Amino acid sequence: MRGRCGPIAGLKEKLLAALRGGIKTVLIPEDNAKDLVEISESIKSGLEIVSGLAHGRRCWPRALTRKPEPIEWDETTTSAAAVPEEAPVEEEASTLHAH
């Protein structure tokens, strides 16, 4: 809630999943930097691992592809009528049979 990056569980599994999923760069909290010695070189060599992050403000420049822009909200022009209603759901004949 305050932006502090706490430790994560299952670092080895998460890094392996990132590698298998084609992710190139991973950011890990400062509290998990000590856990990197337990990770095999075959996993670490395929990733750019940015460690030592203690606060979210240090993560955002690496995690976001572009800087977010604030949205201008004008409640005088926004009304319930401007929000489209959901399309009605059509009933389909069931093809499932209980046996």
Image (cartoon, rainbow, N blue to C red):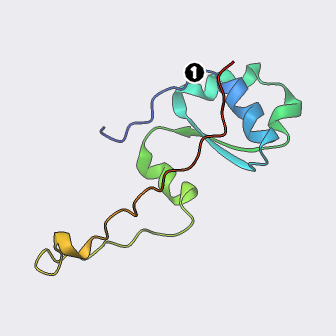
Q: Is residue 17 left or right of residue 9?
A: right
The front one of 48 and 92 is: 92
Q: Residue at x 42, y 68 (%)?
A: 68
Q: Residue at x 57, y 21 (%)?
A: 9
The front one of 65 and 38 is: 65
Q: Residue furthest right?
A: 42
Q: Is residue 18 left or right of residue 67?
A: right
The front one of 67 and 29 is: 67
Residue pointed to by mark 1: 9
Q: Is residue 24 left or right of residue 96?
A: right
Residue 46 location, quadrant: top right
Residue 33 drawn at (x, y percent): 62, 29
Residue 17 location, quadrant: top right
Residue 35 drawn at (x, y percent): 66, 22
Residue 8 drawn at (x, y percent): 54, 26
Determine whether 42 is above or below 71 in the image. above
Residue 58 drawn at (x, y percent): 47, 50
Q: Residue at x 16, y 81 (%)?
A: 77
Dividing the image into 4 quarters, which one contains the C terminus?
Answer: top right
Q: Amino acid at mark 1?
A: Ala
Determine whether 55 is above or below 85 in the image. above
Determine whether 1 is above or below 99 in the image. below
Q: Residue at x 66, y 33 (%)?
A: 96
The front one of 22 and 89 is: 89
**Secondary structure under badge 1?**
loop
Q: How many marks?
A: 1
